[in-house]
Structure formats: C-alpha cells, structure tokens
Image: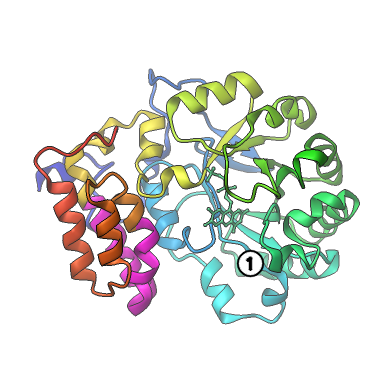
C-alpha cells in the first residue's frame, strides 16, 4: 500500500512499533488556522502546538493518546488517577498512567481533596518519570468523586483548591496545572474567581470546561463563560474546552475568548484525524487512510490490553461507525462482540464502501 509510505508523516500507520515522528505536530504554514494553532509553553514545557487531547476515563488510554499524537495532538492528559490509589501504589492505576510510547508532552492527571495526600501522589508520579506535567482534576462531576470533596466539588471550595495547587507545586518540580468547570450550577457560576484563586496559588496553565457540574456532560457547552478568562490568566496559558469539533469552532472560540489552546474531547472519538485537519496536514486526511488508521488503533489496543481490548475499543468503534447507515442495528450486533476479527471486518465494510456517506474530512 504505497500511500502509507509516500510520506514519513503517514509511514507509521499499520506499524505500531514505528518510531514516533513529531513532524505531524507542527502546524502547517498557510493553513486556515495559521496564527491560532501555534506552539505554546506550560511552565518550562514546550508544546509543539496548542491542540490538546482531553483526559477521558475509559477512552484516552495509551493507544489513543499515541494515535492522536501521531495525528497531530500537541499535548495529552491521562485519565484521572486517584491520589489514594497512587498512595497505595495500585498496580492498575500505575498501568493506566504509565506510558511506554512517545507522544511528546504528556500530563498525568490526579484527583483528591487532601492537599498533603495530593502532594505525596504527585511526588510519586514525578518519581516514575513518565510525564512532563501534573494536572489536577477539579472538574469531575461523578458522585463517587464529588462526595469526597474532590473533582468539581472543589469549585465550591476555592481556598481548598488553591491549597492543593500550592501543596502539589511545593512537592514537585514539574509544572502543575488544573482543569475545572464554569461552576457548580448555572446559579453559582464562579469560573473567574476560581481562575484567580488557582493562578494566584501557582497553577502554570488552566483548562476550563464550559459546562457546570450540574450539566455533567450533556447540553451544549456555554462558551460565554470562557469570555474574560484570558484577561485573568495573563501570561499563564488558558485552554478552552467544550464542544470543539471543527475549524469554525476553533475560530469562533479564539475570537470570543483569545484562548491560548483548545482541548478536544468527544470531537475526536471516532475521528482522531481531527487534529491533522485543524493543523492542515492534508496527507493524513486521505479517505483511503481511514481504515488503516482504524486497524492500527485496534491493533495497538490489542497489544496494550490483551483480551480486554475489544470491549475497551467499543467506545471508539461506535465513534468510527457513527455515520453508518445502519449504525443502530450495527451497535446492537456489535455491543457484545469480543472477536477482534469481526470488529475489524465491520470497520473494513464501513470504510471500504465505494461511496462513503459524507464524513467530512
Ligand atoms: C467518557 C468521558 C470521560 C471523561 N474523563 C475525564 C477525566 O478523567 N478527567 C477530566 O478532567 N475530564 C474528563 N472528562 C471530561 C473531558 O475531559 C472534557 O472536559 C469534556 O468531555 C468536554 O469536552 P468535549 O465537549 O470536547 O467532549 C471526561 C469526559 C468523558 C465524555
């Protein structure tokens, strides 16, 4: 398949052990988003570009982080890891955050509500030498997390949030950042005060998800709450998050907020080439690369997770097949499937159709 080797930027496809080629992370001169997509620095860590893969528990494992980096994502963040689990040196948690591949800049995200425990967990993570940045989760809406005072519950206790940043920053030499929401509910929007508090405490970058805890993950992100944050963050990078799925979204958000970076979550599930599209790497957008990318992703997950790979791949599979004309019946027939060959064939049938429905590049 000559198209895979035509350009060094695509030569890794189908060869998961190929060395990481960072050239796909360089913004393309003359592309539509030139000047908006650009390198930024978090503390002393240089990011090749400001497109960030959002942390997503159950989605952004090592395989997906590496895939997105190979397709251009300039920075990625691990799934959230409990500081208590890290304190107990949980094998499963260490497996989840560790990364043998190379993706360029990578942050491990930890959560908890006790500043001392968080500091200890962060210091342990730093000792593993697996990441460039420590990110603190201040946005998780899940009850199990919130009832311990962690995740988005910290939006109600900005002093505690600030103490966590101070305590963790003292314990590690890596830059410490945090990710939070616009507020707890629509009636208690406090994103600006919160941004002030964590920046004053020493956060080296902030990411703001433009939803409240009350909204969980549903309903449109409310970008109006991101306006005015850049004025508060000053020289500290402010990364916008929520419903970023297209060039138009990036342009609108940039014009409205002046944000320094763009974190993409669900928009790249089933469409990891979105990063290449935003950067202007057209070589990675050829239709005939879609199935090889899908196959590469599944193969990588089989190597990472063994027998549990196929169930774990399901969220991606349904993302890839989203525009399938029979997507509902396909979902039903594949939702219990554990055979990788059947899943592979479903992907092949979909991507190989002579006239694919418009999946926009
Ligand atoms: C399945 C799933 C898991 C998530 N896990 C995390 C997580 O571990 N840490 C975190 O900070 N945010 C997590 N998020 C939130 C995302 O990082 C992001 O803020 C959110 O999805 C909004 O971005 P989007 O509209 O681009 O998807 C998760 C979201 C989803 C959908």
Name the residue nearer the viewer: 148 or 208. Answer: 148
Name the residue nearer the viewer: 206 or 12. Answer: 206
Measured from the top left, where is residue 108 in percent x and y? 61, 59
Residue drawn at x 37%, y 47% is 70
Tag 1's secondary structure?
strand
Name the residue nearer the viewer: 332 or 345. Answer: 332
Residue drawn at x 36%, y 32% is 277
Magenta-drawn stretch contains 132: no
83 vs 19, left or right, is right
Characterize the magenta stretch by its predominant secondary structure: helix
Measured from the top left, where is residue 111 in percent x and y? 71, 63
Magenta-drawn stretch contains 311: yes
Q: Which residue is mark 1?
A: 81
Residue drawn at x 90%, y 51% is 159
Residue 101: tell me if it is visible: yes
Q: Is residue 341 above or below residue 316?
A: below
Q: Which residues are magenta?
A: 292-316
Which of the image's four quarters has the C terminus? top left
Q: Is residue 34 above or below residue 336?
A: above
Query: Residue 287: which quarter of the image?
Result: top left
Q: Is residue 251 above or below residue 220?
A: above
Residue drawn at x 39%, y 21% is 29
Measured from the top left, where is residue 122 in percent x and y? 72, 64
356 vs 54, left or right, is left
Measured from the top left, where is residue 298 in percent x and y? 29, 63
110 vs 312, left or right, is right
């Amino acid at each position: 398949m000559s198209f895979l080797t035509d350009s060094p930027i695509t030569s890794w496809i189908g060869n998961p052990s190929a060395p990481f080629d960072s050239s796909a992370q360089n913004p393309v001169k003359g592309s539509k988003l030139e000047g908006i997509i650009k390198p930024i620095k978090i503390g002393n860590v240089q990011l090749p570009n400001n497109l960030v893969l959002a942390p997503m528990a159950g989605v952004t494992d090592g395989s997906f982080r590496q895939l997105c980096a190979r397709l251009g994502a300039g920075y990625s963040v691990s799934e959230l890891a409990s500081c208590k689990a890290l304190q107990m040196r949980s094998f499963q948690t260490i497996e989840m955050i560790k990364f043998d591949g190379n993706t360029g800049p990578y942050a491990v995200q930890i959560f908890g509500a006790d500043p001392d425990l968080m500091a200890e967990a962060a210091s342990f993570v730093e000792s593993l030498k697996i990441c460039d940045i420590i990110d603190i989760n201040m946005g998780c809406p899940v009850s199990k997390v919130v009832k311990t005072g962690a995740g988005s519950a910290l939006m109600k206790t900005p002093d505690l949030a600030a103490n966590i940043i101070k305590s963790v920053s003292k314990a590690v030499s890596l830059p410490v950042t945090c990710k939070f929401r616009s507020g707890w509910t629509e009636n208690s929007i406090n994103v600006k005060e919160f941004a002030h508090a964590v920046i004053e405490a020493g956060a080296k970058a902030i990411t703001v998800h433009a939803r409240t805890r009350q909204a969980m993950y549903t309903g449109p992100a409310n970008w109006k709450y991101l306006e005015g944050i850049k004025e508060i963050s000053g020289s500290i990078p402010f990364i916008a998050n929520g419903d970023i799925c297209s060039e138009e979204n990036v342009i609108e958000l940039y014009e409205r907020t002046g944000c320094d970076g763009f974190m993409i979550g669900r928009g790249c599930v089933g469409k990891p080439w979105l990063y290449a599209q935003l950067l202007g790497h057209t070589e990675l957008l050829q239709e005939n690369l879609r199935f090889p990318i899908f196959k590469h992703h599944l193969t990588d997950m089989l190597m990472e997770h063994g027998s549990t790979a196929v169930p774990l791949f399901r969220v991606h599979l349904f993302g890839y097949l989203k525009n399938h004309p029979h997507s509902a019946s396909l979902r039903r027939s594949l939702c219990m499937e554990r055979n990788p060959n059947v899943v592979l064939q479903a992907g092949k049938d979909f991507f190989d159709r002579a006239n694919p429905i418009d999946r926009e590049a």
